[in-house]
Image (cartoon, rainbow, N blue to C red):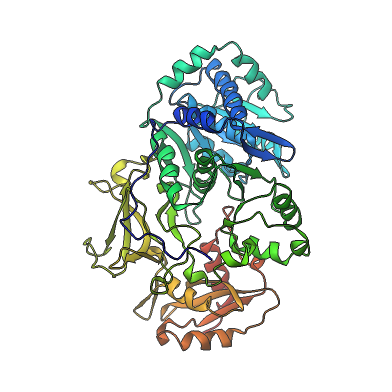
């Protein structure tokens, strides 16, 4: 049965690593403890911890040979793979700054990030799942016929190094970078590593916001290395575990929770080029995966696949794809599952409970408690004063895992004078220190003078067994300012009408909160989603506004 006796808020200490928290020191400790164990698997390629040390050393020497050093901004554009891991470690080992690029980027997005982040060197795959990155680069960078790029559009970009076929005259194969590194001695690499400090900026991770240009959160070596170690106490990862995670490592969830968490535990990441239910089930069986992580709709697709009952998934014991867990480990009521609140700016969770445990009934719907070492304020956005315990307000956060800055944004425009970051999230802590998330501050619906929190209505709409997702927002109305509207996705094979849903909600909340408009969908594919797997709320609002534009 799931653990029901989880420790409460304030009972867990901050747990930082027993060495100076830098990538070189972390890797050295991991290789000493887990050298022959596998760290990454992709198809038939298997990379041990010792292999990761050797591969990252080769790339690090290559980067040193072309003039990369502490503070040089190195773009990394590649899918989850042993190559990505080796390159990320290499960048960290020499104190460079890794700019993590999204493999879903189209030409315009790639152009924007390369320019905004001032990328000087780019490590990229040539192609991936139909994406031709060299063609996209050619569209926007306008390079000359020389590997030493000097482009007016991207004046800081100097070179592009490619895994895979490279026909462009302005780029060079990764093998050439590795060959250049052969002239760099082990002593020279060690000397560069010795200059890396926890306070050094290490990575820039861009958010996937749906309403504005992405923000580049800058994180230090110490924050990345410490946060994964501190979160380890909330998890059940062990040496030899095998983790399937659909989370891309160019986002903080994949980087911190999957990669760095595995490095500490001595676990192996089982990579998959693409999520395809049948192939993924076969992979989980073949690699004897112990932990499975992904988005909720993935679990449903896996369970509904005809191969689900034919595969031996007995190795799986934990993860966020609950339907794949053994029956005795499943928590059917989603409101009693441990949840977390996190963001790119805090390297993932800043509130969390012990994963795999069941919440007490009286803490239904909570998002755990403050991660040790992270502080919170719940602030009334109108007065700037702290809210009383149990009262909803804006969440402010600070602590060791908070980003050092937003790239190209003044500190005064990012943090309060005493270092707090206004998250834009809404919630409250109860008297026992448990946190409850109630939505985004900007998502409040104003209808006929009433303030309505969408998340409150979403929770009610998601209660019926027939419903898998509910998204609530405000749509314009000439007299009431906004009306409450909802997009509801049903489980496969289920039926439920908009009127039945409206009646259900009306029986449970005040009348002014009941959605005036409800659109029912039989599949989530009819709704707009971000590349990160999150719902595009701006897109949902536009969709519903257009659908109900002529409905009073």
**Residue at x 25%, y 68% (from the top left corner):** 389
Asked whether 31 or 462 is in front, the reply is 31
Residue 322, compared with residue 32, is above or below; it is below
Asked whether 295 or 41 is in front, the reply is 41
**Residue at x 51%, y 51% (from the top left corner):** 236
Q: Is 544 on the left or on the right of 439, as rendered?
A: right
Residue 32, compared with residue 325, is above or below; it is above
| Res 367 quadrant in image | bottom left
Asked whether 364 or 129 is in front, the reply is 364
Q: Is 300 on the left or on the right of 90, as rendered?
A: right
Residue 182, compared with residue 376, is above or below; it is above
Q: Is 469 on the left or on the right of 412, as rendered?
A: right
Where does residue 155 sit, x and y in percent of width and height? 51, 27
Mark count: 0
Where does residue 366 sit, x and y in percent of width and height? 41, 67
Asked whether 415 or 371 is in front, the reply is 371
| Res 165 quadrant in image | top right
Where does residue 264 sit, x and y in percent of width and height? 49, 39
Residue 348 visible, this orientation: no
Q: Is 521 on the left or on the right of 264, as rendered?
A: right
Residue 470 visible, this orientation: yes
Residue 337, compared with residue 549, is above or below; it is above
Where does residue 178 sit, x and y in percent of width and height? 63, 19
């Amino acid at each position: 049965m799931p653990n029901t006796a989880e420790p409460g808020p304030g009972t867990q200490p901050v747990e930082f690593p027993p060495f100076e928290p830098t990538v070189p020191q972390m890797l050295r400790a991991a290789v000493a403890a887990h050298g022959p164990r596998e760290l990454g698997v992709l198809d038939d390629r298997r990379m041990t911890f010792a292999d990761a040390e050797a591969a990252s050393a080769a790339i690090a020497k290559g980067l040193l040979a072309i003039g990369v050093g502490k503070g040089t901004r190195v773009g990394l554009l590649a899918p989850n793979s042993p190559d990505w891991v080796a390159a990320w470690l290499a960048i960290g080992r020499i104190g460079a700054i890794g700019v993590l690029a999204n493999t879903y980027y189209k030409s315009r997005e790639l152009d924007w990030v390369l320019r905004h982040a001032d990328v000087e060197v780019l490590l990229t795959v040539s192609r991936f799942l139909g994406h031709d990155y060299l063609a996209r680069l050619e569209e926007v960078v306008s390079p000359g016929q020389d590997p030493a790029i000097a482009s007016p559009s991207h004046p800081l970009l100097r070179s592009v190094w490619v895994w895979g076929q490279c026909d462009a005259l302005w780029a060079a194969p990764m093998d050439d970078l590795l060959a250049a590194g052969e002239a760099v001695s082990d002593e020279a690499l060690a000397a560069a590593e010795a200059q890396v400090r926890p306070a050094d900026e290490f990575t820039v991770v861009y958010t996937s916001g749906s309403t504005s240009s992405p923000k580049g959160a800058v994180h230090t070596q110490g924050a990345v290395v410490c946060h994964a170690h501190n979160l380890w106490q909330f998890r059940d990862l062990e040496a030899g575990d095998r983790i399937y995670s659909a989370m891309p490592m160019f986002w903080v969830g994949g980087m911190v929770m999957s990669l760095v968490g595995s490095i500490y535990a001595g676990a192996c990441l089982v990579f998959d080029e693409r999520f395809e239910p049948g192939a993924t089930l076969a992979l989980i069986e073949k690699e004897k995966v112990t932990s499975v992580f992904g988005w909720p709709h993935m679990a449903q697709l896996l369970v509904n696949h005809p191969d689900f009952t034919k595969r031996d998934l007995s190795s799986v014991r934990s993860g966020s794809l609950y339907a794949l867990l053994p029956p005795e480990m499943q928590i059917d009521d989603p409101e009693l599952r441990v949840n977390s609140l996190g963001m790119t700016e805090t390297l993932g969770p800043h509130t969390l409970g012990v994963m795999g445990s069941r919440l007490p009934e009286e803490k239904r719907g909570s998002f755990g408690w403050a991660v040790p070492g992270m502080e919170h304020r719940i602030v009334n956005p109108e007065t700037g004063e702290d809210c009383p315990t149990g009262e909803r307000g804006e969440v402010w956060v600070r602590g060791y895992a908070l980003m050092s800055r937003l790239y190209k944004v003044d500190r005064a425009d990012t943090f309060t004078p005493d270092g707090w970051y206004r998250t834009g999230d809404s919630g409250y802590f109860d008297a026992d220190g448990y946190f409850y998330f109630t939505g985004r501050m900007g998502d409040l619906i104003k209808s006929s003078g009433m303030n309505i929190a969408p998340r409150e209505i979403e929770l009610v709409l998601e209660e019926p067994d027939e419903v898998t997702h509910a998204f609530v927002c405000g749509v314009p109305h000439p007299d009431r300012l906004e009306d409450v509207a909802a997009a509801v996705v049903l489980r496969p094979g289920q039926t439920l009408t908009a009127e039945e849903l409206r009646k259900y909600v009306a029986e449970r909340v005040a009348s002014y909160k009941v959605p005036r408009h409800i659109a029912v969908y039989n599949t989530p594919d009819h709704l707009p989603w971000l590349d990160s797997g999150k719902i595009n709320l701006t897109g949902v609002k536009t969709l519903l506004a257009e659908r109900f534009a002529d409905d009073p």
